[in-house]
Image: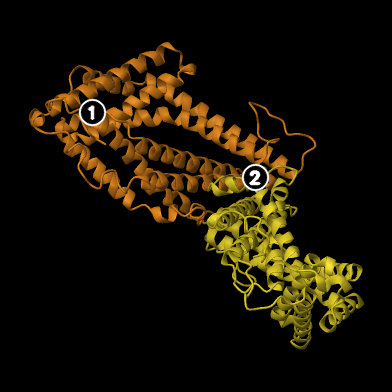
Chain colours: A yellow, B orange
């Protein structure tokens, strides 16, 4: 992992970073143009590309911060985070709805809504009715939330705040504001720093426990008042972000090989995040006033089901992570060889 | 496994069986006397011993049926099954209550009732209130069911039907009604027959799926109207009974070594049964009219939690079972060497 092409002479660090940022900025602007041309309702592909480029720019500005004009890059990073967050919300609600309807279909094939306005079968018992009502409630709530997120995203893309972000990215595409002494530095130590933070964060995870199947950790305090599940999820979400930062840093320093282990670990933590958010959405739907007990019961089953998906994702993460020793490289600086 | 003491000469099969049945009958009568002397409310120990002896007698009458007076032993077996079932119910409700309150304590430490009349903390949110109400509801329902089962058991023990069972067992304790030709038969083929049925039943289980942690099988169709979870549990319950029958048959033919694998497999399937029944009890409590949505939600989480325990027990069973090859002896007749 993290071995550079040996034929390649060490290019000046600042140039390598600048080239990467220019590429990503160009990709950002291209996706933005596509998004505008394709009409706002069919722009899922360009929106994903826009967010992917924004994340890479933002991550690189963070990892290689000492090589860049600090004030300028901190500002752009904050604004890119706002933009990514705003654009991600719509997609997030849609994905959550898909996941929950899929789970309901597994729990009660007759009850899960297919498309809009799925009707409850007339001859079914209380369980199926509860599941069907839970599905309808979740669909209504998440569809409404998605519609609102869509409007917010459209507003954001038309705002002067967004135009300032696009201008900032356009500057990157033409001339990256490197600090004068950046050329003398090597990029690897900064990437190694991210990797060290990642390894440290993974070490702090309860991996031994996660490696015991059916440890029931994800539902621990699942009915407690202080929303304990969310607090136990936080370190895993943090590792997910560091894993992504690490992957982008490897892209910048030009690692050729795709590390399937990093990809597998990332997928497990994406699933962890998705399941955790779906479980929250089920719990939140259950707080709707005046719902029937059968609906609430189905939402409780659905919540627990998704919390078990959270546990399953942790199990999958530790299995991928332990597969080839612990850590991404036993603390060895990335690309230092 | 199933090796007999090599120093021992082959005793006549009927004698060996008769000796075992006499021992168990004596144990049954001893436990019955203790149960009467200890006062009916403190008789959990003797009641367990009574049921254990009844199960062993009943199992042996079944396995070695061709060696015994068929009509007589079929009648006694049916009556012992009635008795075991009646006595088991009280203990079953108590165990289910313990299991569910334990699970609630894990889900919501502040809410689970401790002893009778546990009050809901005043400052807690909807989740804790729901969990506390669910706990109180389950405690009320299962305590009532247990009290009724206790009365039924007492009535049964005072009935003429019971006295007829005790008389039948007393006959066993003095003279086992063997068929005349029983002496010429060997016991091992009958035990091997049970083992073969056990192996066949295990082979029919979805062990490959059970060996994949977090396969979500136990909640499949968990919100469907046709009570699918119960139907998927049945083959596992069947293996649990055959495993016990196999263990008793090994006792009869005098296998010295305790097979830890059989014990482990049996424990996993006991847990499977307990969790399945606890999940049912939670679902059944959720059908109580006019409960609050928060209570129903907590019961849904609790139900799913116990269904995952069901899945965990299946995982544990297959792990124990696969540990030393498949099957109890690859179809080799027990003790045939």
Identify the subunit bearing mark 1.
B
Q: Is residue B178 visible?
A: no
Relative to B13, say whether B203 is above or below.
below
Relative to A185, say whether A219 is above or below.
above
What is the x, y in percent for residue A190?
A: 76, 64
* SS for dot 1: loop
Front-most of residues B68 and A178:
A178
What is the x, y in percent for residue B265?
A: 39, 40
Q: Is residue B50 visible?
A: yes
Identify the subunit bearing mark 2.
B
Q: Which mark is residue B298?
A: 2
To which residue does mark 1 refer? B254
Q: Earlier in the sequence, mark 2 or mark 1?
A: 1
Residue in view at x 32 percent, y 48 percent: B325
What is the x, y in percent for residue B231?
A: 42, 51
C-alpha gap between disc 2 and disc 1: 49 Å
**Which residue appears farthest toward the bottom when viewing the image?**
A37
Image-quadrant location for residue A224: top right
Q: What crowding class fits label 1: few (fewer than 14 Cα within 10 Å), some (14-19), or many (20 or more)?
A: some
What is the x, y in percent for residue A116?
A: 65, 72
Residue in view at x 63 percent, y 78 percent: A7
- B92 left or right, relative to A271: left
Q: Quadrant of the C terminus of chain B?
A: top left
Residue in view at x 68 percent, y 67 percent: A247
* SS for dot 2: helix
Relative to A83, say whether B210 is above or below.
above
């Amino acid at each position: 992992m993290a071995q550079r092409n040996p034929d390649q002479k060490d290019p000046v660090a600042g140039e390598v970073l600048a080239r990467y940022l220019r590429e990503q900025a160009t990709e950002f602007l291209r996706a933005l143009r596509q998004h505008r041309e394709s009409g706002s309702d069919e722009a899922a592909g360009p929106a994903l590309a826009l967010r992917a480029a924004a994340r890479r720019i933002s991550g690189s500005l963070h990892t290689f911060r000492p090589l860049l004009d600090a004030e300028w890059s901190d500002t752009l990073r904050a604004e890119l985070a706002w933009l990514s967050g705003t654009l991600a919300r719509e997609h997030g609600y849609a994905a959550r709805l898909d996941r929950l309807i899929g789970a309901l279909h597994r729990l009660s094939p007759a009850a899960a809504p297919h498309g809009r306005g799925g009707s409850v079968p007339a001859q079914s018992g209380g369980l199926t009715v509860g599941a069907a009502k839970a599905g309808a409630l979740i669909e209504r709530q998440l569809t409404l939330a998605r519609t609102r997120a869509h409007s917010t995203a459209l507003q954001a893309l038309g705002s002067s705040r967004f135009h300032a972000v696009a201008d900032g990215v356009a500057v990157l595409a033409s001339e990256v504001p490197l600090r004068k002494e950046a050329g003398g530095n090597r990029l690897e130590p900064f990437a190694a720093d991210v990797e060290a933070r990642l390894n440290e964060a993974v070490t702090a995870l309860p991996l031994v426990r996660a490696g015991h199947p059916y440890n029931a950790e994800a539902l621990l305090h699942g009915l407690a008042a202080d929303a304990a599940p969310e607090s136990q999820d936080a370190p895993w979400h943090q590792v997910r972000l560091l894993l992504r930062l690490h992957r982008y840093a490897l892209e910048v320093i030009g690692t050729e090989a795709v590390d399937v282990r990093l990809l597998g670990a990332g997928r497990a933590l994406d699933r962890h995040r998705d399941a955790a958010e779906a479980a929250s959405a089920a719990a939140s739907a259950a707080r709707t006033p005046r719902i029937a007990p059968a609906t609430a019961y189905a939402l409780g089953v659905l919540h627990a089901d998704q919390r078990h998906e959270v546990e399953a994702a942790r199990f999958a993460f530790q299995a991928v992570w332990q597969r080839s020793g612990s850590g991404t490289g036993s603390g060895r600086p990335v690309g230092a060889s």
